[in-house]
Image (spheres, rainbow, N blue to C red):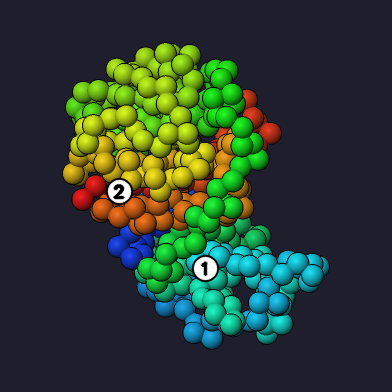
């Protein structure tokens, strides 16, 4: 079997494992054409990868004062409210939400901050002035980096080229933004953020069946595999806001599968369901099930449509047995007219933070965790070949205490 050496090129899936306020996070990025001769790696990772084969992995640890940059106290900056506005719109003063992220370019009159900057700035306090943290969202966290070798490519003679810093690439554009700031609640749930483009009856919008997959096959496989890890065989499962496919593995035996959804034709087509329920949670947030009657609740690509998610989370906690798992999965595709407004305003990793905040604010859940998987190539069986990458997958889960 071919092994990696100092001149190899490879396809590698890098995964960050880290924790914040007791929540476990795992962020994976699939990368092609990793160059062992030219590229930069976490200290110790390149040597650990040497002599590994396809399907094998290497690990390295990165302390908080190294990656992606140490935490600097002087990156906490205060501005007056009139200094916070989108570039070019000084007359439209914005009101930030505590715990949320905004482009640093929205902060005016701050030394070394330029209005073209899209780097994240987090609002962490408000009184007479606004307090923003300009540190990288992962600053201050210890990381474990896992590198799984997917494929080793034949390499020729190297004479130069671009050097990629893989640690920087893994950490950029999102990881860290799903965590609370110093365990402070994030302001996600204002009433105006839960409004929708289409406030008409949901029964009308979902009246016609949509017998299509909303995520590509690679993303669906990721979700199925994770549900298989979280749900015990023989469990009683509730598929919340479900349809004709519950995204559960064929080989997972269940005692019962109850599917609650909005379209009768779609529900009838779910061949795994033992019971179906036609029910509009936005109209009637009560889940018509007994207390402690479910071992697991799943929700796939639907949480963004809940207009009162905290009420639904309270109901989910009621129907779960102690130790029962709640797992939610989503991507970056949805029906814009029916998604709550804040969902489209958030960075995709902030959406993951919003779902975790639902667990935090509901209370009574333990072993909270999150997962992100990005960068895989779009599968050949997907009709949207104009998109180069597979649909990203974001998941959050926890157990009822």
In the rendering, which numbered label is found on residue 398? 2
What residue is drawn where x is 57% and y is 40%? Answer: 339
x, y (%) of residue 311?
39, 45
What residue is drawn where x is 63% and y is 81%? Answer: 79
Q: Is residue 336 above or below residue 236?
A: below
Q: Is residue 28 visible?
A: no
Q: Is residue 311 above or below residue 64?
A: above
Q: Is residue 137 visible?
A: yes
Question: In what quadrant of the picture does the N terminus appear?
Answer: top left
What residue is drawn where x is 29% and y is 24%? Answer: 257
Q: CA distance from mark 1 to mark 2?
A: 24 Å
x, y (%) of residue 324?
23, 41
In the rendering, which numbered label is found on residue 120? none
Return the disc, 1 or 2, that comes first in the chain's sequence: 1
**Which type of secondary structure does the marked residue at label 1 adopt?**
loop
Q: Which residue matches tag 1?
A: 98
Q: In the displayed structure, does residue 94 sit left or right of residue 250?
A: right
Disc 2: CA contacts within 10 A as few (<14), some (14-19) or many (>=20): many
């Amino acid at each position: 079997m071919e092994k990696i050496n100092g001149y190899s090129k490879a396809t590698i899936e890098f995964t960050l494992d880290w924790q914040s306020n007791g929540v476990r996070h795992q962020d994976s990025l699939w990368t092609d054409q990793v160059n062992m001769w030219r590229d930069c790696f976490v200290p110790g990772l390149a040597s650990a990868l040497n002599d590994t084969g396809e399907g094998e992995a290497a690990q390295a640890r990165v302390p908080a004062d190294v990656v992606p940059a140490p935490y600097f106290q002087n990156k906490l900056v205060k501005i007056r409210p009139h200094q916070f506005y989108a570039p070019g719109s000084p007359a439209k003063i914005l009101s930030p939400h505590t715990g949320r992220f905004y482009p640093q370019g929205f902060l005016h009159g701050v030394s070394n901050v330029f209005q073209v900057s899209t780097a994240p700035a987090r609002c962490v306090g408000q009184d007479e002035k606004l307090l923003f943290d300009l540190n990288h969202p992962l600053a201050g966290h210890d990381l474990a980096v896992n590198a799984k070798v997917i494929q080793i490519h034949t390499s020729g003679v190297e004479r130069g080229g671009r050097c990629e810093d893989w640690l920087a690439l893994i950490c950029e554009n999102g990881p860290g933004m799903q965590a609370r700031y110093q365990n402070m609640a994030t302001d996600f749930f204002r009433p105006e953020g839960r409004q929708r483009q289409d406030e008409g009856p949901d029964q009308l919008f979902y009246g016609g069946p949509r017998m299509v997959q909303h995520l590509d096959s690679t993303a669906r496989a990721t979700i199925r595999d994770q549900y298989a890890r979280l749900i015990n065989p023989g469990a009683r499962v509730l598929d919340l806001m479900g349809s004709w496919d519950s995204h559960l593995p064929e080989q997972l035996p269940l005692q019962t599968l109850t599917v609650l959804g909005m379209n009768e034709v779609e529900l009838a087509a779910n061949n795994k369901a033992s019971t179906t329920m036609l029910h509009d949670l936005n109209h009637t947030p009560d889940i018509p099930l007994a207390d402690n009657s479910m071992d697991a609740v799943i929700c796939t690509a639907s949480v963004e449509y809940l207009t009162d998610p905290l009420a639904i989370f309270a109901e989910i906690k009621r129907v779960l047995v102690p130790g029962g798992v709640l797992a939610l999965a989503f991507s970056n595709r949805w029906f814009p007219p029916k998604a709550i407004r804040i969902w489209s305003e958030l960075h995709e990793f902030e959406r993951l933070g919003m779902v975790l905040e639902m667990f935090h604010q509901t209370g009574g859940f333990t072993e909270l965790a999150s997962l992100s998987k990005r960068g895989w190539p779009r599968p050949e069986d997907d009709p949207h070949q104009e998109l180069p990458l597979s649909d990203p997958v974001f998941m959050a889960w926890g157990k009822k205490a």
